[in-house]
Image (tube, rainbow, N blue to C red):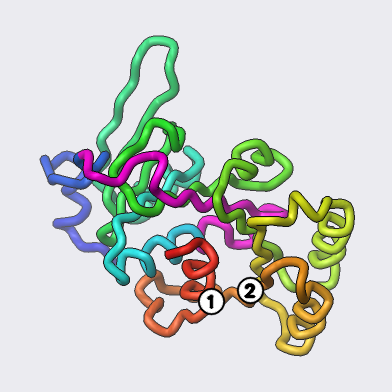
Amino acid sequence: MLGTELRKSRTAAIPHQGLPAKKNTTKDTRILVTIAGLEPKVGATHLALSLALKASEQGKSCGVILPEKNFDSMKECYVLSVREETAAGQRKRQFASFAGISIMSGVLPGDIEGFQLLIWDCGVLSEGARRFASGDLRCIVSGGQAWELAPLNALLLSTSYEDLRGLAVCIRGVSQDDFNHIHKQMAGKIPCVFVQHKPTWSDISLREDLVALLRLAGC
């Protein structure tokens, strides 16, 4: 599907973004959005990449930090040209360009400068809670089935009002009636966004859910 020329890109010297050149944007002025799935396979990585593409479409410089296994899956699937950095006693760092945005793994937000918006896919919330807590906007992704919404409700009920600040709940695959019910329950407490899960990355032009999240992030 990708064609012979793209398959050759594994060994060809193809330029890519990697780390951006330092600009006026600093760690203190950029926005960090953290995204975590309440359960595995609910679409946290899909949302992180879609949100980055939407931000880029709006003219913002954006980078995405992915878990290593997700980055490795993408580089295999899309035959990305990857730059790697390794040092004794340090984690492997990987950088690539995907659909015009910078993606990376093995780095921390403090390592990165030059982006207006940095999106950190923290994986599953139970494993990445500390990383997730560092975001200016923190997006919890949940499926919309009854057995998926029960853990979400339990989490929100056990979370203090102070910790709800800066948090957004993103629900995928829920019926409109169920979403309206959840949204009504959350009214005045926490933003609740009905996120879409499109099969193609390029289908972001009408994604009002992404626009809503960027607005919540202050973009």
Which residue is more in the foreground, 83 or 54? 54
- The residue to which callout 2 is attached is 193
**Which quadrant would residue 105 be assigned to in this image?**
top left
Q: Which residue occupies 39% across, 39% down? A: 27
Image x and y of residue 42, in percent: 65, 61
Q: Which residue occupies 57% across, 53% down? A: 35
**Which quadrant would residue 201 be assigned to in this image?**
bottom left
Q: Residues within 10 Å of mark 2 (few under 14, many from 20)?
A: many
- Residue 131 is left or right of residue 100, and the answer is right
Q: Residues within 10 Å of mark 1 (few under 14, many from 20)?
A: some
**Disc ID at residue 209:** 1
Q: Which residue occupies 26% across, 39% down? A: 19
Instruction: Tell me, yes or no, whether the two marked residues, 1 and 2, touch with CB atoms within 8 Å.
Output: yes
Q: Type of residue at label 1?
A: Asp
Image x and y of residue 18, in percent: 25, 41
- As helix, strand or loop, the secondary structure at mark 1 comes to helix
**Disc ID at residue 113:** none
- As helix, strand or loop, the secondary structure at mark 2 comes to strand
Q: Which residues are magenta?
A: 22-47
Image x and y of residue 28, in percent: 41, 41
